[in-house]
Image (spheres, rainbow, N blue to C red):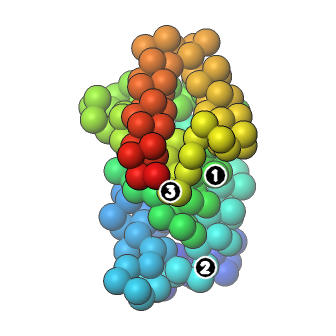
Amino acid sequence: ISLLKEAFRNKDEETFFNLFPHSYAKFIAYYGYVENQPMPLYHEAFEHIKFLTSSKICKQKLLEKMVNIAKDAKWEADAPNFLRKVLTSFILEYPETILFLLNDKEAEEIQNFWYFMLYYPSLNPENDDQYTYMYEQIYRCVNERNKAMGQIIKDVYHKIVVESKCDS
């Protein structure tokens, strides 16, 4: 953690990238809020994610790291949610790369990735225009390139809609 902080302070993109968590468990251990306690880098999460995602690191390597975190992620406020927002824009900007990276994942990991990307707590998707717009953008962008992945997104979205109705 101290080396990651030092790389950030020194604006050493390559070292920072290499030390940045590569899994959701490690991401939460660094940036999460666990059992009512902020983890060591909780307060630096937004700056670190912005630094990482605006770096000159090869986009495929960056997206691979982000997909590997997101495939096991669960929605949480703060760091995971911010990561999800940044990843949403990358899905729309680099859909082929995201699809290529997801192609190597197990079916359950792919489903979990899209669930993380589309889920939002206390949501009524049918009455939330911003949520619906985000879903439709992602769906159209992916579906025009890969119908099977588009269907997975649609299925996950409908699962979330059903769950949100049950929670209401």
Callout 3 secondary element: loop
Q: Tell me: residue 11, above or below residue 21.
A: below
Q: Amino acid at mark 1?
A: Lys
- For the question of whether residue 117 can be seen, the reply is no
Nearer mark to the viewer, of 3 and 1: 3
Q: CA distance from mark 2 to mark 3?
A: 24 Å
Nearer mark to the viewer, of 1 and 2: 1
Q: Tell me: residue 19, above or below residue 142.
A: below
Q: CA distance from mark 1 to mark 2?
A: 17 Å
Side (left or right) of 36 relative to 47: left
Where residue 143 sits in the image (x, y, percent)? 56, 16
Give the residue number, with chain letter if any, for mark 2. Answer: 44
Callout 2 secondary element: helix
Give the residue number, with chain letter if any, for mark 3. Answer: 121
Counting other residues with Cα less than 10 Å from the Cα at mark 2, is it few (<14), some (14-19), or many (20 or more)? some
In the image, which disc is placed on residue 85?
A: 1
